[in-house]
Image: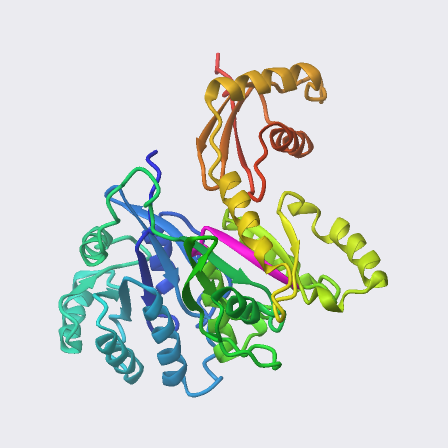
Amino acid sequence: MSEVLGPVPVLAVVGRPNVGKSTLVNRIIGRREAVVEDIPGVTRDRVSYDATWAGRAFTVVDTGGWDPDARGLAQAIAAQAEIAVSLADAVLFVVDATVGITDADEAVVRILRKSGRPVVLAANKVDDARTEAEAYGLWNLGLGEPFPVSALHGRGSGEMLDAILAALPEPPAETIGEEVGGPRRIAIVGKPNVGKSSLLNKLAGEERVVVDNVAGTTVDPVDELVELGGREWRFIDTAGIRKRVKEASGHEYYASLRTSTAIDRAELAVLVLDGSQSISEQDVRILQTVREAGRALVIAFNKWDLVDEERRYYLDREIERELVQVQWAPRINITARTGWHVDRLVPALDKALEGWETRIGTGALNTFLGRLVAEHPHPVRGGKQPKILFGTQASTSPPTFILFTSGKLEASYERYVERRLREEFGFVGTPIVLQQRPREKRKR
């Protein structure tokens, strides 16, 4: 599989609740991942998915999950569409062909026109020829040709996908060397009021971001090109991720949507924690988001001037307990307000990005695996002892390994393999993905 270099184009899927956006997203990505239920506004948590069509990769952002009662439905849809559209390279606008054009659809169309983004119009729920005729009434929206599709049955989805590819920009040509993807993309993440904006201002050397002692001042992510250590970096300052996306109201929901999108679009996330406060469940949840997205990670404990001896003692215990899953992430202690130790960020970023892009030759990997299996074989279970026969590194960013085995390895042994890989080859600051391919039993 060829690795995708540079940013992958983004397609936002917008439309009223219950027009079948998530079913259509599942159809586009070719698997059931988006939550589908016959209740408007089910889409809430996970919003971006990887998709490929005709050999081209793109990201699909499934928008939705707003609360229709929050503030007038049309307004909620407008806000949701505006944010999704501002992040995307092209938009798939889904309309229910059996219902026709509603006022809410008209409101979205106005935003889409204003945005100047290319739009593909999908007339969904076209399950037969009769509904197809109704779909063509959607020419009146003035967005060009409507593509009649049935998300449920897959009818017409090929033509729609071809139109989507035509609307998305071509991915950048692959170039070898430093210039792939331009400046390194860094997302600054953390819960509200831990000092993310103060850190960005200190790095940029000027007041670029509104800083206020009210939690959650920053709602929109601000992309900043900042020169550090003689190089240019792109920092994406994200709104604090709120407690639970489900509990988030209006703009907070969009803020968390944008934060997860920012993590997806970054190469590395700097998780800012308030050193003077206990590590919370919310901090751990943000860590999970970064790990699941496969991004490099640096942890910055901010407000270190407020950490006394006693707090330091408890913080060490919390780190052992709460950050056990990410012991590999470089940690730095800083005070963003005064700039104390902020210069330690660049070496930590470099180290983590280097780990994220580390590649091990197949020969060296198999020599290492052979030694590991000889020293510490897999325990025998039920008379069977699975063995690692061969391994290969499929990709970097994050480092992904495929282990060909004689049977399924236990999770504890997999963790052991990961730990030894880190001891041997470093992999500082990056998650490692291990995929198993147990050998199929031959049927006699």
**Scheme of colours in the image:** rainbow
Depicted 111 relative to depicted 371: above or below: below
Percent across and percent down for residue 15 are 33, 71
Q: Residue at x 65, y 28 (%)?
A: 420
Nearest to the observer: residue 247 or residue 335: 335
Residue 339 visible within the image: yes
Query: Which range is magenta?
Result: 264-273
Question: In the image, is 101 to the left or to the right of 438?
Answer: left
Nearest to the observer: residue 147 or residue 320: 320
Number of numbered tags placed on the structure image: 0
Question: In the image, is 438 to the left or to the right of 323?
Answer: left
Q: Which residue is situated farthest in the front direction here? A: 230
Percent across and percent down for residue 157 are 24, 54
Q: Which residue is situated farthest in the top direction here? A: 444
Which quadrant is home to the N terminus?
A: top left
Percent across and percent down for residue 125 are 28, 64
Residue 36 visible within the image: no
Depicted 43 relative to depicted 287: above or below: below
Magenta stretch secondary structure, dominant? strand
Q: Which residue is situated farthest in the bottom direction here? A: 72
Depicted 246 relative to depicted 431: above or below: below
Percent across and percent down for residue 292 are 53, 49
Depicted 383 relative to depicted 129: above or below: above
Q: Residue at x 63, y 69 (%)?
A: 338
Q: Residue at x 47, y 29 (%)?
A: 393
Nearest to the observer: residue 341 or residue 122: 341
Q: Residue at x 62, y 54 (%)?
A: 299
Residue 110 on the magenta segment: no
